[in-house]
Image (cartoon, coloured by chain):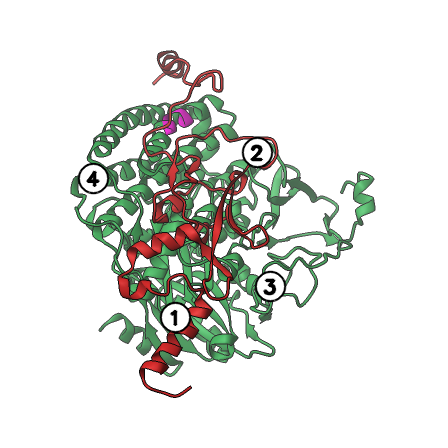
Chain colours: A red, B green
Amino acid sequence: MSRLSWVKTALEVGVVTKKYPYEDVEVPEGFRGLPEFDAVKCIGCTSCANVCTPDAIRVVEDVGSGVRRLEYRVGKCIFCGRCAEVCPVSAITISKEFELAYKGEVVHVIELRYARCSVCGKPFTTSKHLTHVEGKLSEVIRENVDLCPDCKRRVSINSIIQSAGAVR
Amino acid sequence: MDVVGRILKILEGKVSNYKVINSGNVIIDVRAEDLVDVVRIITEELGGIYSVIVGNDARRVDGTFHNIYVFSLDSLKTYLLVRVRLSPEEPSVQSITSVVKGANWGEREVRDLLGINVLNHPDPRRLVLPDGWPDNVNPLRKEFNYQTRPQLNCSTQYTPIRSEDVVALPYGPYHPLLHEPEYFELHIKGETVVGVEYRGFHVHRGIEKLGESRLTYNQIPFVAERICGICGFVHNVCYCQAIEGASGIEVPERALYIRSLILEIERLHSHLLWLGVACHILGFDTGFMHAWRIREPIMNLAEALTGNRKNYGLNLVGGVRRDVSKDSVGKVIKILKNVRDEYSRFIKGLTALKEVVKRLEGSGILPKAEAVSYGVVGPVARASGLKRDVRVDHPYAAYKDVSFKVPTYSGCDNMSRLMVRVEEVYESMSIIEQLLDRLPGGPILAENAEVPEYREGFSSVEAPRGEDVHYVLTGKYSKVYRWKVRAPTYNNIPALNVMLHECPLSDAPLTIASIDPCFSCTDRLIVVDVRSGKRFKVGLKALAKGWRP
């Protein structure tokens, strides 16, 4: 094979580089780009934050303002798509968007109002999360759903004691 | 006689306890005073090749420090893990570097990171920790919080070589021919390299500590993948296999096939990348451009199959996250056919160039005996006549179902290392075709992937650069107690001492590149050989004034 064959290959192949960003670049179906959050669907269960490896999704409990805040930081995201996989209400979709270089920090925020315990008034989860859970429970268990874990424990123990006929 | 029986018979009276863990690998407990003898018997009579040393601060499990010396018994298709338990107050153990040269780094690593004192070590300098790191602060001990950043004492002085006729030539940490931050001090006499000193671990990121402190089982795969920017999927698979092995999780067959498929796609792109870099270092940039052009469709393929060009994010403990569709099978076959044609043409052109061949032939010699003693892995071992390949010696994923050749050369030089990789590309393409042909149906993720507490798992994967090993000890609260990673380059760099000795300076960059080094991988851990010349100290001020040897 002659040395000239390299030239021949180069001429045959031509230019393969693209004039990006002046020319669009296609990404395939199923590409994992920017996650998009649907604030209407989100129930604030924090599953996404639990699986997030780089802590790109963080939960801030702002009791003073009465809201649970979910913050997503694009700069920390590794685009693994685990959040979309675990979301129980499909509020997260993985888009094909990959041009994400911005100056400064970009934070997407979802705020959800707390549900307050019907006994002690302490906030314990979001009201949308509570409604979601309520819909999944049978009537028997649904009874004390609006109680915070502490009050629920106390109420349950009391009712067991009473049904067993013990004297307080 | 079975494998365990044979091991116990040869090591009669020295093994106090043994346990068979996943994939038939055997852990034996020996007394610390017998260690050197046991290692000698394993290497001489069982044909064991050194793989890794795993140090473990197991004081919260059984009150002792563990040092686990791992040997690959290629002929018995098993790994032998030799464990010594060391005192929790002052752990110390005899050095085995006199028996296996490859253990040099491993011993210094456990000393740096765990404070396990190694007695009679030939080169007891620091390996992983920077010189200014305070004494007696060992980051992998459990009492060390992962967010701690100790005050560095920067007055430590650099000690270059000084001799009448030997000159120290710095190569790195930033250099046009090195693509990652590592430092080689080449000692040259005239035009000939007579010694080399390596200092790395500039990009040690403490990934093991992070995994043990903050991450849960299913978060680690995504971090493991980022150990390497080229063959990250290898670490990802290896970690998952170790956890699955430790917990006895059955991975669905289709998932195993998909893992093998992506591993081979990764080998294709990695070898093509290396071929390009080798051309570039030889000053043949045309070859570099063509190699990377041919590689591009492979990258697109990975993107289509996994959702990203690199960092595939495919594995979880128990299987994979994304299935391979019928459409994409056809696409893979079509792209492979084109790549094979282009690649054949490229290789034919490259090997016909005399100036390329002459530079490669006879340079960077690593004799077989040295290859064994250093425990080198992957194409470096196979180019020195050692027929070692994890895919054959310790089959994992779907490799037991496919047939392929393990290219082995006995030239022991840079040409052999190039040819091994050249042929492996063809083998990988054939493996991919076989896998797609036989792709079984069914689920891709195990239903119930529970991980029990305090179980050990050991796993290895044939990375493009050689054997990658992961060891895990599971812990409480969905976290690993100990996660040890040893990347292939870790075992290959020390052998550069041999390859570079008496080699002309102009061949040094190519020889260093011939092991396809991957420093970020290695830097979760270093080698040195100083031959002639006196040493003296040069202060920071003298360096700033432009001091020269």
Give the quarter of the figure containing the N terminus of chain B.
Answer: bottom left
Sequence-first tag of 3 and 4: 3
Density class for disc 4 (Cα within 10 Å; few <14, some 14-19, many ≥20) is: some
Image mark for residue B453: 1
Sequence-first tag of 1 and 3: 3
Q: Which residue is mark 4?
A: B436
* Identity, as a three-letter code, of the amino acid under mark 3: Asn
Residues at marks 1 and 3 touching, judged by CB atoms closer than 8 Å? no
Confirm whether circles 3 and 4 share one chain: yes
Measure how far apart labels 3 and 4 are at the Cα level: 46 Å
Residues at marks 1 and 4 touching, judged by CB atoms closer than 8 Å? no
Quick one: SS at disc 4? helix
Image: magenta residue range: B291-296
Kindly report which numbered mark, 2 or 4, lies closer to the viewer in this rendering.
Answer: 4
Residue A81's spot in the image, x, y percent? 39, 43
Measure how far apart labels 2 and 4 are at the Cα level: 39 Å
Q: Which residue is mark 2?
A: B177
Sequence-first tag of 1 and 2: 2
Residue furthest bottom as drawn: A167
Quick check: is B477 in the magenta stretch? no
Q: Chain of mark 3?
A: B
Q: Residue at x 61, y 44 (%)?
A: B184
Sequence-first tag of 1 and 4: 4
Residue B65's spot in the image, x, y percent? 52, 74
Kindly report which numbered mark, 2 or 3, lies closer to the viewer in this rendering.
Answer: 3
Q: Chain of mark 4?
A: B
Image mark for residue B145: 3
Residues at marks 1 and 2 touching, judged by CB atoms closer than 8 Å? no
Give the quarter of the figure containing the C terminus of chain B.
Answer: top right
Confirm whether circles 2 and 4 share one chain: yes
